[in-house]
Image: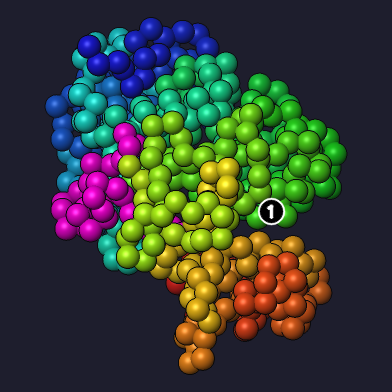
Amino acid sequence: MTPRLLPGLVTGNDRVALRFGTDVLTHGELASVAGSLAAGLAGRTRVAVWATPTIQTCVAVVAALTAGVPVVPVNPKAGSRELEHIVADSAPDLVLAAPDAVLPGELGALPRIAVELGVTGTPWPGEEPDPETPAFVVYTSGTTGPPKGVVLPRRAVASNLDALAEMWEWTGADVLVHALPLFHVHGLILGVVGPLRRGGSLHHLGRFASEVAAAELAGPGTMLFGVPTMYHRLAADCEADPALAAGIGSARLLVSGSAALPATDHERIATTTGQRVVERYGMTETLMNCGVRVSGDRRPGSVGLPLPGVELRLVDDAGVPFEAADSETVGEIEVRGPNLFLGYLNRPDATDAALHDGWFRTGDMAVRDPDGYVRIVGRRATDLIKSGGYKIGAGEIENALLEHPGVAEAAVTGEPDEDLGERIVAWVVPAETTPTADELADHVAKLLSPHKRPRVVRYLDALPRNEMGKVLKRALDG
């Protein structure tokens, strides 16, 4: 008999499973509410979930998973063209949403089921689906075309969450705190399904605020999931308020993901709270690939070691694997293991192109330290700069720039250069005083090496970012 993805929904108990402000469900109540909803979903091909940051979104996802029906989480901020594509591509049988949610016209033709917390039933009695059954269809950002639907099987979700539990010593006693959106891997699969699989609790903040996060962690909260923009705000607020810093320092574990956390913010948080942030690395297609163990070296700039069960290798430009672990040789990350997706929905061509001898091509460039720790240096498409015969990762230059007191934010790109092939361009949001281009070039040259210094510096009021805090480099005009 296949073990259940969410075993707690069979037994149930009176411990809090989900808390969104004043909306609270225990594990027993969640089993009852989701069980009632699941009865009407059984046999469906796919269901869309209007993924607002509410307890109703979680109930909808849990009900579909227990009924064995794949979930298509829909970003409530998606534009009309993206919504049209997702609906046409995934062809959901219906849409689940909170009763008061106003749905756009692109979803208007779908039958709608309102997720009512007061409608209860019995825990779902059905058999657990085969581990290869799709659990989610999560759409990528679509930076090079329409978003692709990543089909994630139950096997990937279960194995990856269990590997993270081993790495982070994550148990049912933990109370996870976060304010992440619920339409992607970080906030939904790790941040909702993760604590429920462990039999623990999620306290969702709705909107991130340092003082609210600190209050939760000073109370029942034990773990915080966030993205670099949140931790940057936390770093400043902890420096300004020792009581807030003490609350954050009460956490058992602070985890950052979705983008690299600058070393400067690592150190600021460690200085004020006594806690060092743990980083991990993953993708929609692979879930999590690497992470730093609770007991491991929480080294700024590193995503740690491959998770249990995940194989990782670096390959050169020709796709040939190499074993160098010298902290310098850059290669593309390829991974394989039970964490991999089944493919892109309706896109066998894209699926084939993403695989290399059974390994998934991540497009992420990295170096490996002598102890096996992996350091991401950027994306092949936007962050690998080939200048003067060197392969240079944008990420390390960005971290170096952020160590300059005159730099508040920084992004690095490459642009064509007749002599060098590509020249390094720094996009800088100044702090209180604006450093000169020569100052910044000298600063990087001293910290790293002369060939990694920016040849051009452009100043901005703010960097373009997406909802997860990632810099949109394609929006930076050369």
Instruction: Tell me how the rendering is colored.
Output: rainbow
User: Could you tell me which residue is drawn at 21 percent across and 30 percent down?
Assistant: 133
User: Could you tell me which residue is drawn at 26 percent across and 34 percent down?
Assistant: 153
Q: Position of residue 279 (x, y in %)?
A: 58, 43
Q: Position of residue 373 (x, y in %)?
A: 55, 45
Q: Position of residue 252 (x, y in %)?
A: 67, 27
Q: Identify residue type, mark 1.
A: Ala
Q: Quadrant of residue 442?
A: bottom right
Q: In which quadrant will I find the N terminus?
A: top left
Tell me, yes or no, if residue 170 can be seen here: yes
User: Could you tell me which residue is drawn at 64 percent across and 29 percent down?
Assistant: 295
Q: Is residue 87 left or right of residue 250?
A: left
Furthest residue in direction bottom, as rendered:
418
- For mark 1, give the secondary structure: helix
Range of residues picked out in magenta:
337-365
Above or below, 449 relative to 4: below
Q: Nearer the viewer, residue 405 or 300?
A: 300
Q: Nearer the viewer, residue 285 or 231?
A: 285
Q: Is residue 52 left or right of residue 244?
A: left
Q: Position of residue 280 (x, y in %)?
A: 53, 42
Q: Nearer the viewer, residue 400 or 431?
A: 400
Give the residue at mark 1: 263
Q: Is residue 7 left or right of residue 170?
A: left
User: Could you tell me which residue is drawn at 78 percent across and 37 percent down?
Assistant: 273
Q: Quadrant of residue 94?
A: top left
